[in-house]
Image (cartoon, rainbow, N blue to C red):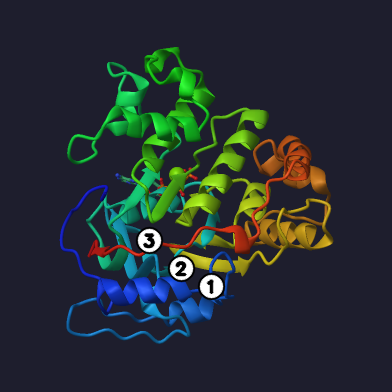
Amino acid sequence: MATDVHGRIVPIGKTAANQATTATTAPHGKPSPQTPAATATTTTTTTTTTTTTTTDQDADAAAIEVAGLTRSFDGRRVIDDLHLTVRPGEFVALLGRSGCGKSTLLRVLAGLDREIEGRVLVPRRRAVAFQAPRLMPWKRVWHNVLLGLPGRPGRALAERALAEVGLTEQATAWPKTLSGGEAQRASLARALVREPDLLLLDEPFGALDALTRITAQRLVADVWQRRGCAVLLVTHDVEEALLLADRALVMDGGVIAYETPVALPRPRDLADPGFAALRAELLDQLGVTTSASVATSASVATSTSVIASASVTASAQGTSLAPEELGRPRATPHERIR
Ligand SMILES: Nc1ncnc2c1ncn2[C@@H]1O[C@H](COP(=O)(O)OP(=O)(O)OP(=O)(O)O)[C@@H](O)[C@H]1O
Ligand SMILES: [Mg+2]
């Protein structure tokens, strides 16, 4: 079930069958450290005639392949020659200052913005969940979940997705009767029902209170485990990024200015010195002075301290994200956004 089909569909390099072979043998859930330099040298020509890849990664194994992406608004380059590769099944967190272009990048990857230069390859099966749930008030929750799906999908499909997000009871409710967190989860169900190979999440937990946020984080982690899809999560919360992701990126100046693998055992432990070191490193990259104290970071990351302590509890309760437990990534044709 494809989410939408805009533009031309071009598998990366080889055939879909080859993609499937490559994808099932690709390491899953374990990031292979990719330096910014390596990212910058990725050169992939995505026409049907030529494919050139100069990284150590197989282009066929990519869930996202972006090369030389540029997006300008009124002559101002918000994205400026950006390169990015995300592997199937990889969970990547994208951080960056407000206004640096994260949502712009996600919109491009979602296929919602094609006023771009450069090359962008994404799976045809992709789904996006924005911070605002964007539910249609005149349709019941289950109907909202199915909106935009091709064919005539049955209600049972929506109900399964709603069960996944813990909203079985609200299937026939009107959106206005949902709490903010419930609406957010309904939005997530709408993304999940597409069975995406790529899940794009733009601050999906931003409006949630700390405890609901932890529940939603665990939900996304569970879905990622179960479905084995690639995830690109935009967040302002460094700890959220480190709790969930295989790799954290920092966007600045229109490019991925910094990235680090999050090679910590799962479930992640906030008390782990490695966790603290990565947190300090990322905050530093975000321009936050970390030598001051935890209080400094808490004032920057949304509700960091509350989420942190509660997340420890969540981890202790068993949010296990061991790579070997992850689902096998599926391979579907890619779409060339441009
Ligand atoms: N349609 C548009 N027209 C003009 N400028 C835009 C448009 N969309 C985004 N921008 C500008 O591009 C820049 C990046 O916006 P974007 O929404 O991608 O930032 P962001 O990194 O997601 O920020 P935040 O963390 O606050 O959500 C901003 O300066 C914004 O004003
Ligand atoms: Mg944004």
Q: Which residue is the site of mark 3?
A: 79
Q: Which residue is the site of mark 1?
A: 27
Q: Are marks 2 and 1 in contact (CB under 8 Å)?
A: yes
Q: Residue at x 35, y 65 (%)?
A: 331
Q: Earlier in the sequence, mark 2 or mark 3?
A: 3
Q: 271 left or right of 282?
A: right
Q: What amino acid is at disc 2?
A: Arg
Q: Are marks 2 and 3 in contact (CB under 8 Å)?
A: no
Q: What amino acid is at disc 1?
A: Pro
Q: Earlier in the sequence, mark 2 or mark 1?
A: 1
Q: Quick check: can you spot residue 233? A: yes
Tell me the mark number nearer the camera, choosing from 1 and 3: 1
Q: Quick check: can you spot residue 133? A: no
Q: Residue at x 55, y 55 (%)?
A: 93
Which x, y percent locates residue 184? 47, 30
Residue density around tag 3, few if under 14, some if 14–19, many if 20 or more, within 10 Å? many
- When the figure is inspected, residue 143 is found, relative to residue 177, above or below; the finding is below
Q: Quadrant of ligand 2?
A: top left
Tell me the mark number nearer the camera, choosing from 2 and 3: 2
Dot 3 falls on a residue whose secondary structure is strand
Q: Which residue is the site of mark 2?
A: 87
Dot 1 falls on a residue whose secondary structure is loop
